[in-house]
Image (cartoon, rainbow, N blue to C red):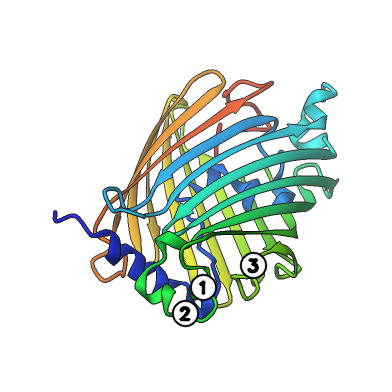
């Protein structure tokens, strides 16, 4: 396949940054394994963990998005030795670090999250969460596309490096059960109004996110998992995704995913005593506006205190 030129990718990115808002949609195709990043209320839903992923979008295209993510979550119920911390625990905290590069922009996000749980019944929890997000955005004026150079806001930074920082807040709530969950979260509640540095962005609108999932053990050796994701943000297309996975003998998982109007993916992973490792290969739909390069995504989740085994309160080992 013919290599897309550096200029072409920048022209595309310049059109994507509508109304001079240096914002990008952060795609995570295996979104169900990083729930707390999108909604702080889901912090600790799978216990105390260390998580990470690397995503190389449109592989082989110069200037294409690359994303690196690391997080750790601590469930105070597990730390206190609760017999069933997922149900009886009350508090959890998280630290998320995301670095994203696309075209002339470099973004780094640091988010500290907290979740508190209220037990509604023997099997259900209502979770509330909040997070503080600190984001730095760096603009390389030497790498602006022709479209961006002609923009009155971005054009003044041609040939120089500029940066700005934004402090904002995330909020969320979720209803959780061992077999299913539904949640609603908001990123950047304040719309990026607390900022410092060069002003090459005209605001950063809030993003609303709905996540839901269901999982069930079909037999002793097979379990099925379904997850759905919806995100909406001003000036960006709505993001709708679905994932369907099968876990075999609690050691191997296979799955398919679809981002409506954009891409489809195939997933596979292995499960050990404490660790889950996954790989995803994503290819754009024929009618989408994505570049022809394919996307690779690698994920890892490590349980700090509990094993990847089924229990009465955890009939399936993963989401």
Q: Residues within 10 Å of mark 3 (few under 14, many from 20)?
A: many
Neighbour tally class for label 1: few under 14, some 14-19, many 20 plus, Cα within 10 Å: many
Cβ–Cβ under 8 Å for marks 1 and 2: yes
Q: Which of 260/57 is in front?
A: 57
What residue is drawn where x is 75% and y is 32%?
74
> Which residue corresponds to mark 2?
151
Q: Is residue 213 found left or right of 267 in the rendered image?
A: right
Q: Is residue 70 above or below residue 22?
A: above
Where is residue 28 shown, x and y percent of the image?
48, 51
| Secondary structure under the numbered disc 1 in the rendered image | helix
192 vs 250, nearest the viewer = 192
Q: Which residue is mark 1?
A: 154
Q: Which residue is mark 3?
A: 208
Q: Nearer the viewer, mark 3 or mark 1?
A: 1
User: Looking at the image, which residue is at 34% across and 60% down?
Assistant: 263
Disc number placed over residue 49 in the picture, else none: none
Q: Residues within 10 Å of mark 2 (few under 14, many from 20)?
A: few
In whole angstroms, how far apart are the C-alphas of marks 2 and 3?
28 Å
Answer with mark 2 or mark 3, whichever residue precedes in sequence: 2
Element marked by disc 2:
loop
**Residue 244 seen anywhere in this rendered image of the structure:** yes
Residue 68 or residue 178, whichever sits in front: 68
Please provide percent x and percent y for residue 313.
Answer: 68, 32
Query: In front: mark 2 or mark 3?
Result: 2
């Amino acid at each position: 396949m013919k290599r897309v030129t550096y200029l072409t990718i920048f022209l595309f990115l310049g059109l994507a940054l509508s109304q001079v808002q240096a914002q990008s949609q952060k795609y995570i195709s295996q979104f169900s394994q990083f729930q707390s990043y999108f909604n702080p209320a889901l912090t600790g839903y799978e216990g105390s963990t260390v998580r990470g992923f690397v995503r190389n979008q449109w592989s082989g295209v110069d200037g294409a998005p690359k994303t690196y993510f690391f997080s750790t979550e601590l469930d105070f119920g597990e730390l206190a030795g609760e017999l069933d911390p997922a149900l009886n625990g009350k508090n959890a905290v998280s630290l998320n670090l995301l670095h994203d590069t696309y075209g002339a922009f470099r973004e780094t996000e640091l988010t500290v999250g907290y979740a508190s749980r209220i037990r509604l019944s023997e099997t259900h929890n209502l979770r509330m969460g909040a997070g503080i997000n600190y984001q730095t955005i760096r603009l390389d004026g030497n790498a602006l596309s022709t479209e961006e150079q002609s923009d009155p806001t971005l054009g003044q930074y041609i040939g120089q490096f500029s940066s700005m920082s934004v402090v904002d807040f995330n909020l969320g709530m979720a209803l959780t059960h061992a077999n299913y969950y539904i949640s609603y979260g908001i990123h950047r509640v304040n719309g990026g109004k607390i900022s410092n540095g060069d002003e090459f962005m005209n605001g950063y609108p809030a993003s609303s996110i709905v996540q839901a999932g269901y999982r069930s053990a079909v037999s002793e050796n097979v379990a099925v998992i379904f997850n759905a994701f919806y995100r909406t943000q001003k000036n960006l297309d709505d993001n709708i995704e679905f994932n369907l996975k099968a876990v075999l003998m609690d050691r191997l998982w296979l799955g398919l995913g679809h981002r409506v109007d954009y891409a489809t993916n195939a997933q596979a992973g292995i499960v050990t005593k404490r660790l889950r490792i996954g790989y995803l290969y994503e290819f754009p739909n024929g009618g989408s506006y994505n570049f022809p390069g394919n996307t690779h995504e690698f994920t890892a989740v490590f349980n700090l205190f509990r094993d990847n085994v089924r229990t009465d309160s955890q009939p399936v080992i993963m989401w």
